[in-house]
Image (tube, helix red, strand yellow):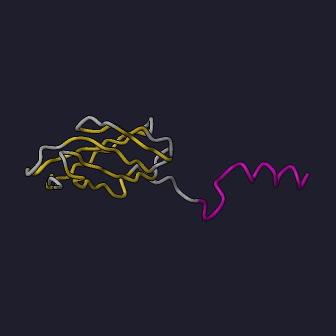
Amino acid sequence: MGAIAAAGLLGAAPAPGAAATTPLSIDYFYCISLGHGRMECQAQASGGTGSYTFSFTPSTFYVSQSGGYVDWGSYCNPYRVSSATVTVNDGTSSVTQSTSFYCGDAV
């Protein structure tokens, strides 16, 4: 009977020291100019459910994603300050972050 009682207690409460679920967040997000009116952005997400979907503004011409990391390219207007926005959704919640950068033009 002691084993049955112990087994019942094991499912009654979380184990001490169990990690709490962390909220969805964007760890970093930045964009750089690649020249000739092109830009590249990178972002890293963590927390939440761990199943991430990314969306971007401006629209992209390539996207490479691996887990919570994403790298994408888009176009920007040379010799102007440009902005970009990333939104991460994990099916339960979403977070959005924006940044600005100078879109240069390589020779």
Residue at 23%, 46% in the rendered image: 38
Residue 67 x/y as whole percent: 50, 47
Outermost residue to the bottom: 17
Residue pictured at 72% horizontal, 48% vertical? 11
Instruction: Residue 14: name its quadrant.
Output: bottom right
User: Residue 100's x, y, as percent?
Assistant: 16, 53
Q: Nearer the viewer, residue 64 or 13?
A: 64
Image quarter for residue 95?
top left
Most extreme residue toward the left is 80
Question: Residue 22 in the image: x percent, y percent?
Answer: 46, 54
Rendered residue at 42%/38% (across/down): 53
Give the residues drawn in magenta, as a range.
1-18
Quarter of the image that includes the C terminus: bottom left
Please say if 69 is above or below 59: below
Residue 32 falls left or right of residue 2: left
**Which one is nearer the viewer's eye here, 15 or 88?**
88
Q: Kindly give the residue lying farthest to the front in the view shown.
A: 107
Let me know if residue 6 is in the magenta part.
Answer: yes
How many numbered marks does the figure carry?
A: 0
Rendered residue at 39%/40% (across/down): 63
1 or 87, which lies in front? 87
Q: Position of residue 69 (x, y in %)?
A: 44, 51
Residue positioned most to the right: 1
Does 42 appear in magenta?
no
**Residue 39 appears left or right of 52:** left
Q: Locate residue 4 relative to residue 28 in the image: left or right.
A: right
Give the camera-side residue of 41 and 54.
Answer: 41
Residue 36 to residue 28: above or below: above
